[in-house]
Image: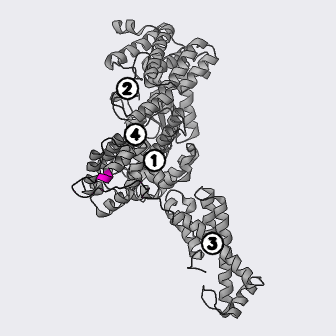
C-alpha cells in the first residue's frame, strides 16, 4: 500500500518534488501536510484541479486501507495479507462485500496515482527524434551526419560538425566537466532540431556557440533544457531576438528556473504580487549583504521575465515600462528601511524626523526601460530643536541624511557577486552635483521657488513620492510640488528657455539616425519637452494637466483645450510608437542600434511593434513622424535652431 506502484509514497513524492521545485519562490507550498500541499499546488497552477482531486481521493482511500490492515493484528505493516480470510476481514472493514469489487476499486486507485506520478517523473522527451545519424566524435566527418545536417537545413554542415566537436573536446568552461558533456550529448538532437527550425540554422548555431562560450558552467542548464525542451524554444527566441537578454542568461542561468512557474504564462504580475514576492525573498536573508544579493537576483529574474513576456507578445511595451517601474518602486521601498536600520545601529535616529524618496525622470513617469538609471531625490525634515541623532555616535541631521543617501546609492550600485542592482542619478536634486545628496524639505521649497532654472521646473513635472515615513509628509511634498508647478509664468521667457534647453541637448548630443529615437530632432525629447512646457504654461489655470506620465499629460492637455486636436493626433501616436520601439531596443541590446548588424529577429520585433509591413517602411514612417513632431514643437514653443544661435 505504501511502497508499491501507485501507492501512498507516490502521492507524497508527487507533492514533495513539486514543493522542492516551486517552494523556494512560493512560501504557500512549504507545508508538511500532503493533502494541503496538493490543494495549494492546484491553486498556484502547478497541477490541474482534477489531478489534485484524483490524488486526494486516492490518498485518502489508500490510507484507509492501510489503517484497516493494521487493525487486523495491531501490526505496523502496509502489505495486504495473502491469506483469503485475513484479506476478507480488510475489505469487510472497508464496507465492501466481495473480493472482486475490492480488487477493482483498489486497482483503479493504484492506476490513477500511477498515471499522475508517471506524468510528472517518467515522461522523457524523445532525444533521438529520428533525425538520422549524428556522430561528432573522431577526426573525420561522418558522411551520414553530414547528410543529416544538410537535410535539416544546415548549409555548412562541415562547420557545424567542427563547432559541435569542439564542445565535446571541452573547448569552453561550460563543457569541461564530463557530466556537462554527457548531458549536452543527450540534448544535441533537440538542439539541432530547434536550430533547424529558425530562418538560418547555421547562424543560429553560431549564436548558440557564442552563448555557450560565455556560460561559466553547463550542467545545470543542459539538465534543465533536457527535461524541459519548451524552454529551449524560448531560449532560441531570446538568442535570435534579444542579445542583451541572452547575455543575462549566460551570466545568470538561474533566471530560466522561473520559466517553470505556471504563473509566467499569464500577464505581468501586479504591484501587490511583486511587493509580496520581494518581501518574502528579502525576509529570507540572514544578513544585510545577503539581502542585497537577493534583491539583485530578484530584479534580474523579474526583468528577464517581463522582457520575455514582451518578446512572446504576452504584454505590450507600455505594460513593460509600467512593470519595470513597479519593480523599481518595490525595491526602493523595501531596501530603504534596511539601509536605515544599518545606519541606525551606529548613529541612532533623528527624533521626530520625516523622510521621503522622490522619483524623477522616467521612473517618476513610470516609463523606465531595462537600461534606465533611477533619477531620485531624498527629502527630509526634522524639528528645529533637534541638533543630532540619538545614537552612540551622533550625527547632525544634514550629515545623517547625506550618509543615508550614500548608503542607499551603494546598496543599489555596488557590484556584488550578483552584479549591480540599478544605476542611480541624484543630479536632479537642488544645486545639482554641487549640492548635498539629501535635501531638507524647507530648503527644497526655497530653492525651487527662488533659484531653480526653468529646466529644473520641467523636471519637477515628473516628481513622484514613492516612499515616505508618513502619509502626511508625502502629502506636504505633493502640495509643494503642485504649488510650484501652478505658478504664473512669463510664457515668452518659458518658451525661450525650453528651446534653449533643447538646442543645448541637440548640440552636445547630436543625433543623425532616425533610430536615435530619444535625441533626434522630432524625437522623444521633443514630445517630453512639449508636455512639460504645456504643464508649466497652463498648470496655473488647469492643474488637472499636471501628470507625471507624458502621455497622461498630453491627453489631459487635449481634454482641457490647451493642446489642439490635430497636434494631439501628431504627438500621442508618435509618443506611443517611440516608447514601444525604445522599450524593445533597450531590452534587446546594449549600445548603439545599427540596423545593418542587428539580428533579424530584433528587426522583426521592431516591425511588429511599429505596425508596418517591413523595416524599410518602418524607418520611413519614423522619419515622417519626426518631421511632424518637430513642426509641432516649433508651432507650440519656437524654433530650436534660432535658440541655438543665440545661446
* Residue 114 in picture, x, y percent from top left: 59, 70
Q: Report how far apart the C-alphas of labels 4 and 2 lie in the structure.
A: 45 Å
Magenta-drawn stretch contains 556: no
Magenta-drawn stretch contains 144: yes
In this view, the residue in front, 300 or 577, is 577
The residue depicted at 31 percent of the width and 59 percent of the height is: 181
Residue 111 is tagged as 3
In this view, the residue in front, 224 or 561, is 224
* Residue 400 in picture, x, y percent from top left: 39, 42
Locate the N terminus by quadrant.
bottom right
Q: Identify the residue under disc 2.
A: 431
State the extent of the magenta-drawn residues as a range. 127-145
Query: Vertical placement of 308 versus 618: above or below?
Result: below
Question: Between disc 3 and disc 4, whose residue precedes?
Answer: 3
Q: Identify the residue under disc 4.
A: 240
Question: Between disc 1 and disc 2, whose residue precedes?
Answer: 1
Q: Report how far apart the C-alphas of labels 3 and 4 lie in the structure.
A: 44 Å
At mark 2, the secondary structure is loop
Question: Between disc 4 and disc 1, whose residue precedes?
Answer: 1
Q: Report how far apart the C-alphas of labels 3 and 1 lie in the structure.
A: 33 Å
Q: Report how far apart the C-alphas of labels 4 and 1 lie in the structure.
A: 11 Å
Q: Identify the residue under disc 1.
A: 233
The residue depicted at 43 percent of the width and 43 percent of the height is: 197
The residue depicted at 34 percent of the width and 6 percent of the height is: 645
- Count the marks: 4
Amino acid at each position: 500500500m505504501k511502497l508499491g506502484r501507485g501507492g501512498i509514497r507516490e502521492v507524497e513524492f508527487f507533492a514533495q518534488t513539486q514543493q522542492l521545485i516551486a517552494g523556494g519562490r512560493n512560501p504557500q507550498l512549504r507545508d508538511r501536510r500532503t493533502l494541503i500541499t496538493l490543494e495549494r499546488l492546484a491553486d498556484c497552477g502547478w497541477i490541474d484541479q482534477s489531478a489534485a482531486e484524483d490524488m486526494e481521493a486516492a490518498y485518502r482511500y489508500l490510507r484507509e486501507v492501510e489503517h484497516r490492515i493494521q487493525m487486523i493484528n495491531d501490526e505496523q505493516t502496509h502489505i495486504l495479507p495473502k491469506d483469503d480470510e485475513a484479506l476478507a476481514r480488510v475489505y469487510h472493514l472497508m464496507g465492501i462485500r466481495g473480493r472482486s469489487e475490492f480488487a477493482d476499486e483498489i486497482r483503479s486507485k493504484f492506476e490513477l496515482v500511477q498515471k499522475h506520478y508517471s506524468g510528472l517523473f517518467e515522461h522523457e522527451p524523445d532525444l533521438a527524434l529520428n533525425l538520422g545519424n549524428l556522430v561528432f566524435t573522431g577526426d573525420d566527418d561522418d558522411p551520414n551526419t553530414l547528410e543529416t545536417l544538410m537535410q535539416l537545413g544546415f548549409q555548412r554542415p562541415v562547420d557545424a560538425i567542427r563547432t559541435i566537436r569542439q564542445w565535446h573536446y571541452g573547448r569552453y568552461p561550460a563543457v569541461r566537466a564530463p557530466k556537462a558533456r554527457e548531458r549536452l550529448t543527450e540534448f544535441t538532437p533537440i538542439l539541432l532540431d530547434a536550430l533547424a527550425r529558425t530562418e538560418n540554422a547555421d547562424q543560429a548555431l553560431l549564436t548558440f556557440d557564442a552563448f555557450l562560450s560565455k556560460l561559466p558552467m553547463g550542467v545545470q542548464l543542459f539538465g534543465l533544457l533536457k527535461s524541459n525542451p519548451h524552454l529551449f524554444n524560448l531560449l532560441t527566441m531570446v538568442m535570435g531576438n534579444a542579445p542583451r537578454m541572452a547575455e543575462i542568461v549566460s551570466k545568470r542561468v538561474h533566471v530560466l528556473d522561473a520559466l517553470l512557474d505556471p504563473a509566467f504564462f499569464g500577464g505581468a504580475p501586479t504591484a501587490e504580487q511583486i511587493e509580496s514576492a520581494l518581501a518574502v525573498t528579502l525576509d529570507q536573508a540572514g544578513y544585510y549583504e545577503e539581502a542585497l544579493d537577493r534583491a539583485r537576483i530578484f530584479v534580474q529574474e523579474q526583468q528577464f521575465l517581463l522582457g520575455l513576456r514582451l518578446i512572446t507578445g504576452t504584454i505590450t511595451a507600455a505594460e513593460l515600462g509600467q512593470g519595470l517601474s513597479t519593480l523599481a518602486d518595490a525595491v526602493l521601498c523595501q531596501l530603504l528601511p534596511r539601509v536605515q536600520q544599518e545606519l541606525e545601529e551606529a548613529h541612532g535616529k533623528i527624533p521626530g524626523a520625516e523622510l521621503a524618496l522622490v522619483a524623477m525622470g522616467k521612473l517618476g513617469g513610470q516609463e523606465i526601460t531595462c537600461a534606465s538609471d533611477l533619477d531620485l531625490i531624498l527629502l527630509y525634515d526634522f524639528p528645529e530643536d533637534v541638533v543630532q541623532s540619538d545614537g552612540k555616535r551622533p550625527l547632525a541631521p544634514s550629515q545623517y541624511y547625506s550618509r543615508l543617501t550614500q548608503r542607499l546609492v551603494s546598496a543599489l550600485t555596488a557590484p556584488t557577486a550578483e552584479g549591480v542592482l540599478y544605476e542611480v542619478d541624484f543630479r536632479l536634486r537642488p544645486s545639482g552635483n554641487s549640492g548635498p545628496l539629501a535635501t531638507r524639505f524647507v530648503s527644497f521649497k526655497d530653492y525651487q521657488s527662488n533659484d531653480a532654472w526653468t529646466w529644473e521646473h520641467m523636471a519637477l513635472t515628473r516628481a513622484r513620492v514613492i516612499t515616505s515615513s508618513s502619509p502626511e509628509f508625502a502629502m506636504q511634498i505633493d502640495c509643494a510640488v503642485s504649488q510650484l508647478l501652478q505658478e504664473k509664468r512669463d510664457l515668452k521667457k518659458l518658451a525661450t528657455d525650453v528651446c534653449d534647453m533643447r538646442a543645448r541637448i541637440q548640440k552636445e548630443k547630436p543625433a543623425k539616425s532616425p533610430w536615435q529615437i530619444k535625441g533626434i530632432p522630432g524625437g522623444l525629447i521633443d514630445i517630453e519637452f512639449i508636455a512639460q512646457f504645456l504643464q508649466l504654461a497652463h498648470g496655473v489655470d488647469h492643474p488637472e494637466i499636471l501628470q507625471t506620465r507624458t502621455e497622461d499629460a498630453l491627453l489631459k492637455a487635449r481634454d482641457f483645450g490647451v493642446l489642439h486636436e490635430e497636434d494631439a493626433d501628431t504627438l500621442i501616436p508618435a509618443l506611443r510608437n517611440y516608447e514601444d520601439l525604445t522599450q524593445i531596443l533597450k531590452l534587446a541590446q546594449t549600445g548603439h542600434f545599427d540596423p545593418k548588424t542587428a539580428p533579424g529577429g530584433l528587426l522583426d520585433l521592431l516591425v511588429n511593434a511599429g505596425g508596418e509591413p517591413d523595416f524599410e517602411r518602418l524607418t520611413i514612417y519614423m522619419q515622417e513622424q519626426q518631421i511632424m513632431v518637430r513642426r509641432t514643437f516649433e508651432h507650440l514653443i519656437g524654433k530650436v535652431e534660432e535658440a541655438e544661435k543665440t545661446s
